Image: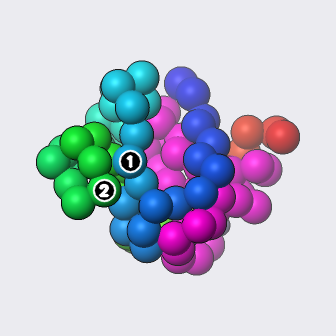
Amino acid sequence: MPIIRFEAADTDDLTAVGEGIARPAREAGALRTGTAVGKLAVFHGDGCAVCGEAVRAGDAFYLDSGAGEVLCEAHGRERRGD
Ligand SMILES: [Zn+2]
């Protein structure tokens, strides 16, 4: 299951994604459709699943589709082994 890195969140809650990311985002329970930022988007309004840090507009973040978790940059990098 992929752990996907996003370079910059669009808003404090949502980041628009393409079709290719829709499936892993859906598996993670984070897919939202018909949002203000785009037809398909990842919801990250609850922040990092490990430390609770908010993912704000412009922040890099990760989505672990296997675990169904959004991660902040530090914890995403750690889990992916970057
Ligand atoms: Zn974190």
Left or right: 68 in relation to 49: left
Q: Splitting the image into 4 quarters, where does residue 40 fall?
A: top left
Membership of 60 in magenta stretch: yes
Examine the rendering and report whether any part of residue 5 can be seen. Answer: yes
* Residue pointed to by mark 2: 37
The percent position of residue 69, horizontal first and vertical second, equals 47, 50
The percent position of residue 36, horizontal first and vertical second, equals 23, 60
Question: Residue 32, relative to residue 12: is it above or below?
Answer: above
**Hey, what amino acid is under mark 2?**
Val
What residue is rendered at 70% in x and 59% in y?
Answer: 73
Number of marks present in the image shown:
2
Which numbered disc covers residue 16? Answer: 1
Membership of 76 in magenta stretch: yes
**Hey, what amino acid is under mark 1?**
Ala
Q: Secondary structure at mark 2?
A: loop
Which numbered disc covers residue 40? Answer: none
67, 36: nearer the viewer? 36
What residue is rendered at 42% in x and 54% in y?
Answer: 15
Ligand 1: image quarter: bottom right
Colouring: rainbow
**Magenta-colored span:** 49-78
Examine the rendering and report whether any part of residue 24 can be seen. Answer: no
Q: Splitting the image into 4 quarters, where does residue 72 fall?
A: bottom right
* Structural crowding at the residue carrying mark 1, measured as other residues with C-alpha within 10 Å and reported as few (<14), some (14–19) or many (≥20): many
Q: Secondary structure at mark 1?
A: strand
**Separation (CA) of disc 1 from disc 2:** 6 Å
| Disc 1 to disc 2: CB gap under 8 Å | yes
| Furthest residue in direction right, as rendered | 82
Left or right: 15 in relation to 57: left
